[in-house]
Image (tube, helix red, strand yellow):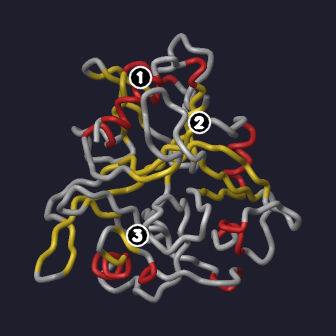
Amino acid sequence: MKLVFSRKGFDAATGKVPSPILPSGQLCSLPIPDRRPERQKTLRFYKDIQTSDLSLGQLAADLSRGRILPETPTHLDPDLNAASVPRPSGWRSAFGQSGAAETHLQRQGVGPGDIFLFYGWFRQAEVVDGRFRYLPNARDWHVLFGWLQVERHIPLTAVADIPPWAVDHPHCQRRQPLNPDSLYIAREKLDLSGIDLPGGGVFPRFHEGLRLTDPDSQHRSLWRLPAWFHPAGRLSALSYHGRSDRWQWVDGAVQLDTVGRGQEFVLDTDHYPEASAWLHTLFTDR
C-alpha cells in the first residue's frame, strides 16, 4: 500500500489565506476558486457548500476580507464530505488530478488500495461581532484534514466510464479533458483492520496527531514526523524527499524540510511497515 500526502485547499498562490480551524476545533478546508469556470458545463459557488451549519460563502468572504465572494465559482476537489452539498444516490468521495501531478502519481504506481491523506494550510480562527477572523498571533500550520482510499482509478478521456453520480465532479465537467487527467473514487469502507469509517471523509476536528508542521517552527513547510519516516536504511523514501539533508533527527522524531514543488508526496509502506500502526492512531484519535 502507498500513502499519498496530497496538498489541497487555499494556499499562498490560490486563495492567498489559510483555511480555518474553527473555534469548535472543526477543520474547514476551503477549496480553491475556479480560475477558468468557462471550461465547466455547470458551476458550483462557495455559497452552495456547507460545513456543519456554516456556508463556505461566509467563511471565504470573511477570511479573505471580501476578495473572494459567496458567488465566486469554486473547484470542489477533493470532494470528501457527503453533507457539503445535496448528493445523488450512490455517491462516494472522489478526487481528480491532472497534468504533471497526475503523471507523478502514475509513475509512483498509485491505484486501488492506496490511501490519500489530504493536508493544507490552516490557522486557528474565531468569531468577532458575527464575522470570522484569524486568531491574533496564531501560527500557520500544515494539517491533515481528510482521506480517501482508492477503489477505482478512472483515466478521464472522451470515452471514460464515469459513474452517473460523479458527472458533476469538477474534473468530469471539463469540456476538454487534460492529458493526463484522472478521477480517483473511494472505497465504500476503509480497508484497515478495526477501523469502521467510510473510504473517504474529513477528520471531524483538529488534534495534535493531524498537525504536520513542527510545533517549534515558524515555517509551516518544516514538518515533524515519527522517527520511522526517516529513509535511512530503507529501500525508498517519500517521493521528492530522497536527499538526506532534508531529514534531521529531533527529540526522538524527525524533522523534514519539505520541498516547494509537487502536490503529492508518495510513501511505499511496503518499506515502512510502521505506517499501519500510525494510520490506526490517526483514525482512532478523534
Specify the quadrant of the image occupied by residue 30: bottom left
**Residue for point 47% across, 24% down:** 275
Q: Looking at the picture, which amino acid does disc 3 mark?
A: Lys
Q: Looking at the picture, which amino acid does disc 1 mark?
A: Ala
Q: From what the image shows, is residue 168 above or below residue 82?
A: below
Q: Gap between marks 1 and 2, in whole Å?
A: 18 Å
Q: Which residue is situated farthest in the left direction here?
A: 129
Q: Which residue is situated farthest in the front direction here?
A: 89
Which of labels 1 and 3 is toward the front?
A: 1
Q: Gap between marks 1 and 3, in whole Å?
A: 35 Å
Q: Which residue is situated farthest in the bottom direction here?
A: 71
Q: Which residue is situated farthest in the top direction here?
A: 233
Q: Which of marks 1 and 2 is nearer the N terminus?
A: 2
Q: From what the image shows, is residue 198 above or below residue 38?
A: above
Numbered label attached to residue 277 = 1
Numbered label attached to residue 16 = 3
Q: Gap between marks 3 and 2, in whole Å?
A: 26 Å
Question: At which x and y percent is residue 257?
Answer: 42, 36
**Residue for point 59% across, 62% down:** 91
Q: From what the image shows, is residue 46 above or below residue 167?
A: below
Q: Is mark 2 on a helix, strand or loop?
A: strand
Q: Looking at the picture, which amino acid does disc 2 mark?
A: Val
Specify the quadrant of the image occupied by residue 215: top left
Question: At which x and y percent is residue 271?
Answer: 58, 17
Question: At which x and y percent is residue 222?
Answer: 36, 40
Neighbor class of circle 2 (other Cα within 10 Å; few <14, some 14-19, many 20+) is many
Numbered label attached to residue 266 = 2
Neighbor class of circle 1 (other Cα within 10 Å; few <14, some 14-19, many 20+) is few
Q: What element carries label 3?
A: loop
Nearer the observer, 131 or 1: 1
Neighbor class of circle 3 (other Cα within 10 Å; few <14, some 14-19, many 20+) is few
Q: Is mark 1 on a helix, strand or loop?
A: helix
